[in-house]
Amino acid sequence: MTWPPQSPDLNPIEMVSDELDHRVKEKQPTSAQHMWELLQDCRKHISAPLAKRCYSHGGKQETDEEFDARWVNYFNKADIDAWELRKGMNTLIGYDLVPEPKILDAALRACRGLDDLASAIRILEAVKDKSGPHKDIYPYLIQELRPTLDELGISTPEELGMDKL
């Protein structure tokens, strides 16, 4: 199955911002002035291919496997920080799909690596909400994630009684 363009792909400002963020982080600015200079330099080098990629990745269609691998790799980054974790989850939840268990596994492990239990619980809440009227999806995901949840010591919102609030 190929993926049609998704709404986050249609936001060129966000795509360019991501590219600038990536390029600046590579250079590791040492001060606010240095960061400003790097941003100005990077802005000058936004190319036509990058601009084209800002619209549906230049027309390339992504397979299910490529999509899953991209997100697993994203959350498995050794240097992922809390901001990147939240940004990734917000983008992922913005897609018209419920993430596969392997993607959620990687995201939950990133939460644990950051000692961010609140984000782990929020991920589970978001996935439950994303499952919508399909009541069998969320229990399936929890079943698939159970070994990871137990290993990492993460309780589900239901186990915490949050569904009764």
Image (cartoon, rainbow, N blue to C red):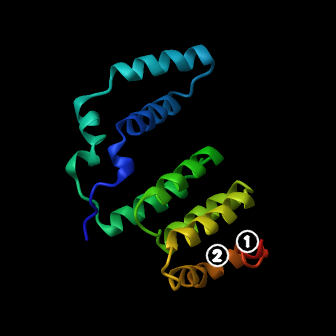
Closer-to-camera residue (134/35) = 134
Closer-to-camera residue (112/57) = 57
Q: Which residue is mark 2?
A: 148
Amino acid type assigned to the residue bearing label 2 in the image: Thr
Q: Which residue is mark 1?
A: 154
Task: In the rendered view, tell whether residue 161 sits above or below residue 94.
Answer: below
Q: Which residue is most to the left?
A: 59
CB atoms of marks 2 and 1 within 8 Å: yes
Q: Quadrant of the N terminus?
A: bottom left
Q: Secondary structure at mark 2?
A: helix
Q: In the rendering, at what x and y percent does residue 136 appear?
A: 51, 86
- Looking at marks 2 and 1 on the same chain, the residue that comes earlier in the sequence is marked by 2
Task: In the rendered view, tell whether residue 69 sits above or below residue 160.
Answer: above
* Residue 140 image-quadrant placement: bottom right
Q: In the rendering, at what x and y percent does residue 100 appear?
A: 47, 72
* Residue 63 image-quadrant placement: bottom left
Q: Within 10 angstroms of label 1, few (less than 14), some, or many (20 or more) residues? A: some
Q: Residue at x 54, y 56 (%)?
A: 89
Q: In the rendering, at what x and y percent does residue 74 appear?
A: 49, 54
Q: Residue at x 42, y 67 (%)?
A: 97
